[in-house]
Image (spheres, helix red, strand yellow):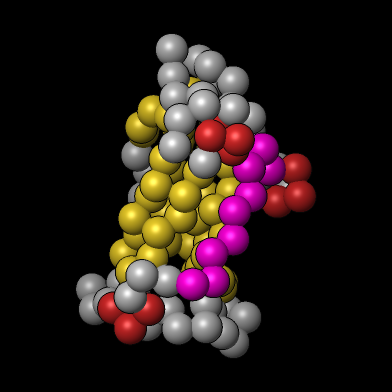
Amino acid sequence: MTEECFEIVPGSYEPFPLEFFDEDSKPLIITGATIHLLVKNDFYDDDEDAVIHKEVTEHDDAEHGKSTVVLDEADTLKILRNKFYCFIIKLVDADDHSHFPAILKIKAGV
């Protein structure tokens, strides 16, 4: 699990390039996997209550664990200024096994 702070400006376009690795730091093959990006008020909120929920099934380079999730202007307008959110990336592989490679805190722009 990773914790990091960064800022998203409401109304902006935000691409997030992602790379997934296994426990030996080798690229994780994500062919057939679905990436779920959730922006929640709190980590323990239900996924259905996420402020933003994006799914990605087509990847930049699945054999090398590379993909991009994009928050467009409509997504980022759902974020209130000067508020912290929990930004969760879930990787669900083709066999329905969930991995939680990153949990990030984000703060909406000033």
Give the farthest residue toward the left.
Answer: 25
In this rendering, position of residue 3 left or right of residue 46: left
In this rendering, position of residue 8 left or right of residue 45: left
Question: How many callouts does the rendering have?
Answer: 0
At horizontal 35% and vertical 59% (from top left) the residue drawn is 18
Asked if residue 14 is among those painted magenta in the image, a careful observer would answer no
Visible residue check, residue 81:
yes
Q: Nearer the viewer, residue 4 or 110?
A: 110
At horizontal 45% and vertical 83% (from top left) the residue drawn is 31
State whether residue 69 is above or below residue 11.
Answer: below
State whether residue 34 is above or below residue 105.
Answer: below
In this rendering, position of residue 41 left or right of residue 1: right
Image spot of residue 93 (x, y percent): 53, 79
State whether residue 27 is above or below residue 107.
Answer: below
Image spot of residue 5 (x, y percent): 36, 33
Asked if residue 53 is among those painted magenta in the image, a careful observer would answer yes
Magenta stretch bounds: 50-58
At horizontal 34% and vertical 39% (from top left) the residue drawn is 4
At horizontal 45% and vertical 30% (from top left) the residue drawn is 12
Image spot of residue 14 (x, y percent): 42, 40
Looking at the rendering, in which quadrant would you find the C terminus?
top left
Looking at the rendering, in which quadrant would you find the N terminus?
bottom left
Q: Nearer the viewer, residue 86 or 37?
A: 37
Image spot of residue 13 (x, y percent): 44, 37
Visible residue check, residue 22:
no
State whether residue 82 is above or below residue 103.
Answer: above
Give the farthest residue toward the bottom.
Answer: 95
